[in-house]
Amino acid sequence: MRRSVFTKDHEAFRTTLREFIAQEVVPHYPDWERQGHVPRDLYRRLGELGVFGIQVPEEYGGAGVTDFTYQAVLREECGRAGVGFGAEPVHTCLVLPYLLAFGSEEQKRRWLPGFLTGEIMTAIAMTEPGTGSDLAGIATRARLSDDGTHYILNGAKTFITGGAQADLILVVCRTAPADPADRRAGLSILCVDTTSEGFTVGRRLEKIGLRAQDTAELSFTDVRVPVRDLLGEEGRAFSYLTHNLAVERLGAAIGSYASAAGAIGFATAYVKERQVFGRPVAAFQNTKFVLAECAAEVAAAQAFVDRALEAHAAGELTPADAARAKLFCTEVAGRVIDKCLQLHGGYGYMLEYPIARLYADTRVTRIYAGTSEVMKTIIAKDLGL
């Protein structure tokens, strides 16, 4: 079906991205997976392509695009090739909205120029070893110095995407004692320069997927953070953390749909070439039926994503609709990619085939940005249940 969410400008951007991915990412991606992170130069190249500045206002050097459609193009092209850009999604889709919504004018002018070029890479540190999704249980603490010029930060974080390569990390911490009557109060966001004394990158965590995206444990021991690097107001972090959830979940939906579409592409090419019992695998009725089922599911996911993009551009994407999109698309991706791997037979289990990478990479989408169970809870509440 014809899609109406993209313009000629989007398609020009798609062509540029597709060429870049084919020439500068795909040939090197297995090496990046083995080393556990993309090279820092990739981020600078993405900065040159304008990827980091799409949604940054023009007064700070960006393109000033307020909708999510260019991000959708980017996710679709990565899915098509079965690759990723390391911690780029966190940098552009998670951290940037916080800086734009809650950063001071001085902070924006100080950080956004480097953000655009990839010279300043960012991450956000919420999860702790003992808290998981319970953000109200955060134990990392920051105490204001006696002279009121800086905070003294102590604590630890885990599962931090991009934490090992980041230059600036938004750290969610407790700046006031926990109140049993309101566990969400007293949390703040401090922007920590990773060259600060007392900041340490701990273990680089080994994951079953997304192996070219560094994920690390971080620790903070008496790290001095200037008060000018407090993001927004003290004690308001919990409300800040919820403001971007709908867009974050839309991004997960798009990435999942795109990976499923990529899997169909890889499987279709494979079954046409692979011979079994003297015939191409594509000649068997089972193969045709499986791919037909997959194509129908991906078409439905694409339509859902396109409608969600339109709703977001119109300012009408609700948290419940974003939850529906994430739940549907991530579950579709899990089913479709599993079926496409099965069509590869034993070769589908080999890491040299992109389908194996997609299989491992996609599993986490049903966990991050809110698990499928959390999405169901949100949807049920929207139904009045």
Image (cartoon, rainbow, N blue to C red):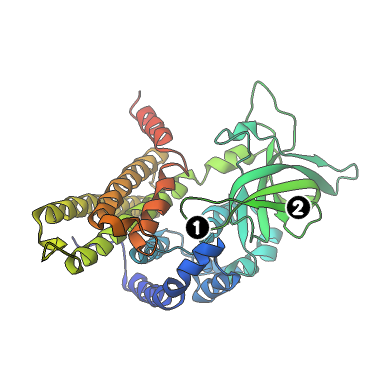
| Residue depicted at x 37% and y 63% | 82
Q: List the residue tagged with mark 2.
A: 199
Is 253 placed left or right of 248 in the picture?
left
Which one is nearer the viewer's eye here, 334 or 124? 334
The answer to whether one can see residue 154 in this image is yes
Q: Earlier in the sequence, mark 2 or mark 1?
A: 2
Which one is nearer the viewer's eye here, 370 or 52? 370
| Residue depicted at x 36% and y 67% | 81
| Residue depicted at x 82% and y 41% | 144
Q: Quadrant of the N terminus?
A: bottom left
Q: List the residue tagged with mark 1.
A: 211
The answer to whether one can see residue 314 in this image is no
Of labels 2 and 1, the one closer to you: 1
Quarter holding residue 349: bottom left
- Residue 43 position, x and y percent, is 56, 69
Which one is nearer the viewer's eye here, 221 or 380? 221
Is 293 placed left or right of 325 in the picture?
left
Q: Which mark is residue 356?
A: none
Q: Residue furthest top?
A: 181
Q: Amino acid at mark 2?
A: Phe
| Residue depicted at x 76% and y 52% | 199
